[in-house]
Image (cartoon, rainbow, N blue to C red):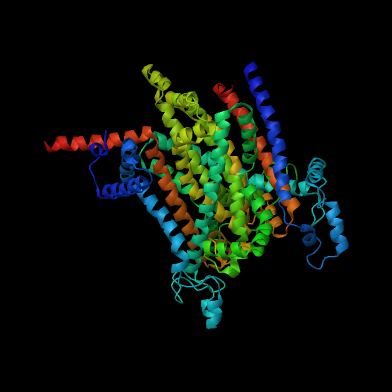
Amino acid sequence: MADIKRFLARRALTFIPTLIGVTFLAYIIAFAIPANPAQAWAGGIKANPEVVARIIREYHLNDPWYVQYYYFMKGILTNSIIDPRWGYPVMTYMLSRFPITFQLTLFALFFLIVLGIPLGIISALKKDSWIDALVRTWALVGVSVPIFWLGYIFIYIFFYQLGWINIAGIPYPKVHITGVPIIDALLSGEWNIVLENIKRFILPGFTLGFAGIGVIARLVRNSFLEAISSDYIYFARMRGLKYRRIMTHALRNALVPVVTVLGLQFGGLLGGAPITETVFSIPGMGRAMVDAIFSMDFPLLIAGTFLVAIIYVITNLIVDILYAVIDPRVRF
Amino acid sequence: MSAEEVYEKKILDRFSDALIAFVVKIITLFRKDWAKRNKSRIDEWRLMLYALNRSPIGIAGLVLGLGFVIVGIIGPWIAPHSYDFSYIMATGKFKEYYLAPPGTGGALLGTDDLGRDLLSLLLYGARVSLMATVLVLPIGITIGIIIGLIAGYYGGAVDEILMRLTDVFLAFPGLILALAFSSALTQRIALAIAHSQFLTSLISSLFGVKPVDALNVAPILSIIVALWIVWWPGYARMTRGLTLQEKNNVYVEASKALGLSSPSIMFRHILPNVLGPIIVMMTLDIGGVILTEAGLSFLMGAMVKIPDWGAIVQAGSQYLVQGKWWLVIFPGLAILISVLGWNLFGDSLRDILDPRTRRSIEFKIKKRKKIEKGEKQ
């Protein structure tokens, strides 16, 4: 166990500079912002000069970069960056949108796991069958399809032609525990809300996860094939173990790399969320960021980018630790 | 083992032989004895192309991918109509042109809500997509390779600092970081274009738009700049890994013993040996750039006022729930085909450039040939 402690310490040490770097990069975005957003925030060309001057003072727009960085960090740590449009703290606003994005990602991950992994296993067991061809095609086509296009095709078929789904609003349960609608509904036992949430999120989730399903399936297939042809399986066969036992042995080892890729996919899913949320009009973080672009609400945009990066970095940390726990070989 | 021994020649092989002969001829123009000294390398190239000729998927991908490039180059010139709607205003029959379904009103793929011919818009959009790819990849890759080589070659503190820097960029999901940067940069770039006559004419000729619309290319250019920022870390990390493996080879030690300078060892000796996987990744990334660029221009939607595949989908999506499907389906199909082409090609290129898998491909074909001969006897 001393081993894993050293690994954790090392990993935590490299985590801190990354975190500082992330704040700095997020700040550089702020620095790249066009000359004077204050004018736009105060109401465009006809804005009152006094209001513009007050906004410049409030957001430190005329200060040198290190002063700006100081206030940026202070604002993030104390949650005192105020949205110029509504006057809410931006972090609070973004965090209030997070549960919806989280639910969307959850649905996508669900498809990745329940479709991707079994498809990969079947295609490895029946190599060169039609299902194997399907998996390989899916992996290639999945990363080539623009997800907004896929989403619109689903909307055209299932909303316009068949009328099976709903693409407006989010069904919220009466109680508020975690903030994630479907989990709250499950906890409080409001089954019709659960069902409506599934109806609302199943297509966006599938659209968002479409590329990942193919990637995961191909990964499982290849690593399972590799495991089957390795020495310990050969040995297990020689000992006369049952087919099922042998396959369980192979599968356990084949699924180790999947943990990492699922973690990496999580970042991809978060990154794809703005597009999926725009297509299906889901009011999550991604949608809020896209809206912020159009109203030049850069504090909100930067807060969103920063928050997503933090979530992503922490997920990667957890995945790395999980990987080290599962597979002792990576601890070095 | 020379190329002739392995394969029976087919039509495509003659073509690829001619292609290589042409390349060799061009190189010998600059260096007289190159062909003689690199005989084995030329033979290796021929073998690679022979292996590619025997992979139908790779050839199909190459045809689609080159199709995208060719359409991107000639698109604006062969487009039946202009991309703005002045020609419709001139006819005065706006109602006939408004959202005409495919095949009606002389529009093969239908028209959009301004009455413009969708086919023409797609052809102009191909140029924008192509320019994005051409401008993003070489620069992103060059930055990545330089940083990766330096980190991998020097190791130690340099490596640690450069890789932590790379980690920071990789900590953001690419699309989100690019979205933030491109929206922050748009106005600055527009200002730069507005103040420079040279930039205006350069951009309008590169992107196939009228000089008046050069300012409207600013969102696309900001997407391109944002993609530089997003695209290099992957290459840096990959090149570093390859360099770490490569620098333990004897030839690196020999070059050091000969007193070669570090840049010379890195770029003239290590780089050619790590280029294979980088080329494969680049081929696969062509599709990635097209896709990401389309996604970003889709998100920026109304801000993009020149024909771009992603923006056309965004503009057309509001009519989808009225059953006007063509404005979404056709641009998306154009993206899908271009991206799929390069991905298919990259996938088979990976098998061909990897010596292990290529030998097995050659072995398979050779074996089959022998069996056929045996049956004849």
Residue at position x 16%, y 37% in the image: B373
Give the answer, above or below, for where A103 lies relative to A53.
above
Hey, which residue is sitting farthest left in the picture? B377
| Residue A198 position in % (x across, y down) | 61, 49
Residue at x 54%, y 82% (from the top left corner):
B90
Is any part of residue A193 visible from this angle? yes
Task: Name the image quarter holding residue A79.
Answer: top right
| Residue A99 quadrant | top right
Q: Residue at x 82, y 52 (%)?
A: A62
Q: Position of residue A108 (x, y in %)?
A: 58, 45
Q: In front here: A245 or A76?
A: A76
Image position, residue B314 (x, y; %) = 58, 61
**In the displayed structure image, the side of residue B342 where residue A76 appears, left or right:** right
| Placement of A246 over or under A154, stated as above or below | above
Question: Measured from the top left, where is residue A242 in percent x and y?
Answer: 40, 22
Residue A241 visible from this viewpoint: no
**In the rendered image, which quarter is residue B68 located in?**
bottom left
Q: Quadrant of the C terminus of chain A?
A: top right
